[in-house]
Image (cartoon, rainbow, N blue to C red):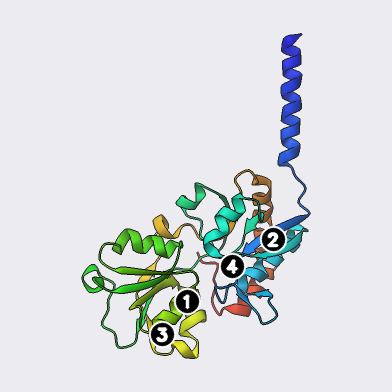
C-alpha cells in the first residue's frame, strides 16, 4: 500500500511538473537594447525600431502570442531575464559557452563576424606588436569586450562603453585608436554614415566560436525549454515563408543569416 501511495504521489508530481513545463504562452515579454543600430534604436516617439525589433515581432506572430517589447540596458539583460523582468532576449546576443552557463538559447537567427575599425591613413595593424599601447573602444560586457580582454588585455588600453554609439563618438573625438564590434553594426551604424567617412575596416573577420559563439540567438531562462522550442519553430517558420528575407532586405543588401 505504501509503495502504491508513493507511486501515485510520484505520478501526480510528474503530471503537475508536466503541466508547469507545458505553460501556455499567451504573452511573451522581450528585452531589446534600443541602442545598437541598425538592429535596435529608439525613434523620436520613443518606439523601438530596427532589425531585432522586426524579427521579435515576426517571431511572436509565428508563435501566435502577444509581443511586449521591453527596452533594457545591455549589461542588465541576463540578470533581468533571470529576475523575470522579461521572458526572452532578442537583442543581437551571441550564443556563447559562457552565457550558456546562465541561460538557454534558441537556434541562431543571424551570424556576422566581428571587425576592427581604424582611421584612414593610420598605420595600425592587428598584431600584438602594432597594437601595443593602443586604446580600443568596445561596448561593455559583449563578446568583443571578452575577446579583447583575453587576447590583448595586457598590451592595450580597453575603453568600455554602455552603448556602441558612445564608443563611435569617442572614435570620432580621437580618444580611441580602434573600435571592435560586429561588422554589420560598424558598417550601418558608423562607416556608412557621414560621420564615418574617414574610417575603415582593418584586420581579418573574427569568428572563433570560443569568443564569438554559434551565432546570434534568442535567450530564455533554462527552465523555459518550451518557450525555447517555440522560438526554434518560429525561426524555421519565418525563414521558410519569406518573412525573414523581407525583414533582412529592409536593412541589409547581403545574407545576414550566414552559413
258 or 97: nearer the eye? 97
Q: Nearer the viewer, mark 2 or mark 3?
A: 3
Q: Are marks 1 and 4 in contact (CB under 8 Å)?
A: no
| Residue corresponding to mark 2 | 237
Residue that label 1 marks: 166
Q: Which element carries disc 3, helix, strand or loop?
A: helix
The one nearer the camera, 249 or 78, is: 78
- CA distance for labels 2 and 3: 41 Å
Give neighbour class at mark 2: few <14, some 14-19, many 20+ (Cα, 10 Å): some
For label 1, the SS is: helix
User: Callout 4: helix, strand or loop?
Assistant: loop
Q: Could you tell me if residue 226 is visible in this image?
A: yes
Q: Quadrant of residue 39?
A: bottom right
Local packing at callout 4 (Cα closer than 10 Å; few below 14, some 14-19, many 20+) is many
Mark-to-mark CA distance, 2 and 1:
36 Å
Upstream in sequence: badge 2 or badge 4: 4
The residue that label 4 is drawn on is 33
Q: Does dot 2 land on a helix, a strand or a loop?
A: helix
Q: Earlier in the sequence, mark 2 or mark 3?
A: 3
Residue drawn 37% across the image and 61% down it: 147
The mark closer to the camera, 2 or 4, is 4
- Tell me the distance, in whole angstroms, between the alpha carbons under discs 2 and 4: 25 Å
Q: Are marks 2 and 4 in contact (CB under 8 Å)?
A: no
Amino acid at each position: 500500500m505504501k509503495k502504491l501511495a508513493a507511486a501515485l504521489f510520484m505520478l501526480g508530481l510528474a503530471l503537475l511538473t508536466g503541466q508547469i513545463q507545458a505553460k501556455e504562452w499567451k504573452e511573451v515579454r522581450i528585452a531589446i537594447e534600443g541602442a545598437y543600430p541598425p538592429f535596435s534604436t529608439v525613434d523620436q516617439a520613443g518606439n523601438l525600431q530596427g532589425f531585432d525589433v522586426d524579427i521579435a515581432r515576426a517571431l511572436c506572430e509565428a508563435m501566435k502570442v502577444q509581443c511586449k517589447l521591453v527596452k533594457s540596458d545591455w549589461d542588465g539583460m541576463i540578470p533581468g531575464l533571470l529576475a523575470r523582468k522579461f521572458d526572452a532576449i532578442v537583442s543581437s546576443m551571441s550564443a556563447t559557452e559562457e552565457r550558456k552557463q546562465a541561460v538557454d538559447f534558441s537556434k541562431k537567427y543571424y551570424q556576422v563576424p566581428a571587425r576592427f575599425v581604424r582611421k584612414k591613413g593610420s598605420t595600425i595593424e592587428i598584431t600584438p606588436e602594432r597594437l601595443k599601447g593602443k586604446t580600443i573602444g568596445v561596448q561593455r560586457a559583449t563578446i568583443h569586450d571578452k575577446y579583447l580582454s583575453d587576447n590583448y588585455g595586457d598590451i592595450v588600453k580597453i575603453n568600455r562603453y554602455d552603448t556602441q554609439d558612445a564608443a563611435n563618438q569617442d572614435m570620432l573625438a580621437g580618444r580611441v585608436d580602434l573600435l571592435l564590434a560586429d561588422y554589420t553594426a560598424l558598417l550601418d551604424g558608423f562607416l556608412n554614415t557621414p560621420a564615418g567617412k574617414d574610417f575603415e575596416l582593418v584586420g581579418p573577420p573574427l569568428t572563433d566560436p570560443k569568443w564569438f559563439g554559434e551565432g546570434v540567438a534568442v535567450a530564455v531562462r533554462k527552465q523555459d525549454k518550451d518557450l525555447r522550442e517555440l522560438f526554434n519553430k518560429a525561426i524555421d517558420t519565418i525563414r521558410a515563408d519569406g518573412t525573414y528575407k523581407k525583414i533582412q532586405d529592409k536593412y541589409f543588401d547581403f545574407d545576414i543569416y550566414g552559413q
